[in-house]
Image (cartoon, coloured by chain):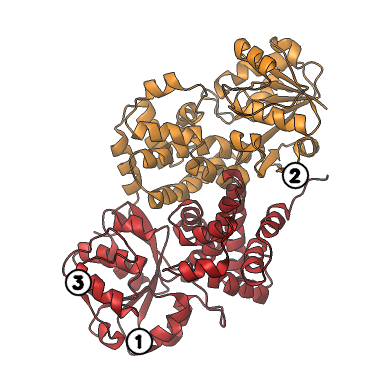
Chain colours: A red, B orange
Amino acid sequence: MKAAFIGSGAWGSALARHLLLAGHSVTLWDHDRENLEVVRASGRNEKYLPGIDLPEGFRVEAELDRAWPRSELVVLAAPSKVFRQITARLTAYTGFLVSVTKGIEYDTGLTMSGVLARTAPRARAVALSGPTLAMEVARGVPTAAVAASGDEEASRVVQSWFHRPTFRVYTSTDVLGVELGGALKNVIAIAAGLCDGLGFGANSKAALVTRGIAEMRRLGVACGAQPETFGGLSGLGDLVVTCFSPLSRNRTLGERLGQGESLTQILAKSVTVAEGYPTAQSAWQLARRHRVDTPIIDEVYAMLYQSKALRQALQDLLGRDSKPED
Amino acid sequence: MKAAFIGSGAWGSALARHLLLAGHSVTLWDHDRENLEVVRASGRNEKYLPGIDLPEGFRVEAELDRAWPRSELVVLAAPSKVFRQITARLTAYTGFLVSVTKGIEYDTGLTMSGVLARTAPRARAVALSGPTLAMEVARGVPTAAVAASGDEEASRVVQSWFHRPTFRVYTSTDVLGVELGGALKNVIAIAAGLCDGLGFGANSKAALVTRGIAEMRRLGVACGAQPETFGGLSGLGDLVVTCFSPLSRNRTLGERLGQGESLTQILAKSVTVAEGYPTAQSAWQLARRHRVDTPIIDEVYAMLYQSKALRQALQDLLGRDSKPED
């Protein structure tokens, strides 16, 4: 099978390695031509996935319009903020599209599959999501993920292509639930990181995660997703790994804020996008639109976009729905 | 309010400190008279809660039958295996009983409240549970817990006694669900620790936690608990903290097994009981009785009680319900 990667950051590169090991053919495209050439020449994506060799046999393509046309599968691993713009160039594509981007479009409230239905309506789109830290998948750590699509046959085809003994793929028809789980958990993870950065403990973070999954489910169901999806790999599983692993970018963003770095400093120094940052704004907007109570998202939004003091935000959060009578 | 603690290990001592700070009067009893005397003399329980000073004003009582009679509240923090034997001596007690012991009796399949209904039927029993690492509560880390009882007024009284700004107490009427969550999560945590000890990553552990909560819910509902309880603090919250914190005894038990220590060595060296060890056996038995499918509990049981090879158990577990067609 011939696959093209649109976006070759950490997750794109880890999945490309994965498909190469499964015996597929891979072409990498990325906006960053310079790094793409380094990857080609060195056989590694040192910038995003340090220390990991890519198997031989992949090729790189600097021109987007030449990267995908002869592929049976296009894997979309670009940041959410450029997702519409990039996928608008795939309008003619009729093969399988797998989105691994976790985000919500601010203007429309759409997840990436929602965007694809407009930009590339002839393709067979599938969302792949779950607790899949890129570096762990790149190291062959046993991982499980979900391939979700309204097109059940498409998700089964994608499942068969991505499945390896160390990477189990389940299928779901609730693509909205799977995508909202993956996107919203990044916002909760920023709050979890803040717990870490401000020296709150695991008890606090566990309480936050418990409320976080309920909040994600509430907002997701208001948008039309199935409630049980949020208890699965792409909801709870992804939330847990993101809130507790030191490798998570979104948790780390919160942690660094908690340790006193400014948002501007952190964003300037980051080579990879913490998707929770734009998603906090989109999710906040989405909750307004659906009139859903989302205390964690609200506090993260206030902190990132309205200069609310971190400690105050977290205290308002941990205290907010206290029921004791004192 | 006058409280007596039956069992003064890590969690008993942390809660005793907590009640003292809330202005209550505290008497400590423990089976280990020698350590009790050290605690009295030093004002610390160095053996179980190192580095934590207890506030002044508590007293110790070496005779169980003299410890509780004039207390309005008895906190039961003894290991599950001696719970029936100890509480049988409280038959005459008519005040409030708070059980913080997380376990399931092997012979009967009863949780601690179930045992109390038989051993101390005149008392007003409440279960207190949740993501409450003892050392964190002892350090004043913000924590949330659940007080559960069929006697709603009793759980509100207990809530008011235990509540402090850094320790929020919610109430529930699903005492069985709250207790089964607290007990079963210790078994899942042993499997999570095994992931750590064998070098599996956070992706694997997140997948395990996701399946673990579903398994806990399935078994709990078969026993008569409410399904939603398992998504709350005493289910998901406690599971998450236990599977991810280095402080958890049950996770650590699994980790040390994974690193090559024998069960006999670990049990011999431990000053505190990892309740997941006896609970694995009781839970396995309970699942048989209710004919519930519990793959994680089954593998932990096979590993601890039937000498099944660890790596084989974990691989059988992570591979067991793979759906891909290859």
SS at mark 1?
Answer: helix
Q: Which mark is residue B165?
A: 2
Disc 2 residue type?
Answer: Pro
Residue B244 locus on image (x, y percent): 48, 44
Extreme residue toward the left, this view: A57
Question: Which residue in the structure is indicated by mark 3?
Answer: A41
Return the residue nearer the eye: A275 or B295.
Answer: A275
Alpha-carbon neighbours of circle 1 within 10 Å: few (<14), some, or many (≥20)? many
Which of labels 3 and 2 is toward the front? 3
Alpha-carbon neighbours of circle 3 within 10 Å: few (<14), some, or many (≥20)? few
Q: Please tell me whether residue B249 is drawn above or below residue A203 in the rendered image.
A: above
Which of labels 3 and 1 is toward the front? 3
Q: Which quadrant is the C terminus of chain B positioned in?
A: bottom left
Q: Please tell me whether residue A166 is drawn above or below residue B256 in the rendered image.
A: below
Side of B280 relative to B50 (left or right) = left
Q: Please, which chain is the residue tagged with disc 2 on?
A: B
Q: Please, which chain is the residue tagged with disc 3 on?
A: A
Q: Are marks 3 and 2 in contact (CB under 8 Å)?
A: no
Q: Is residue A22 visible?
A: no
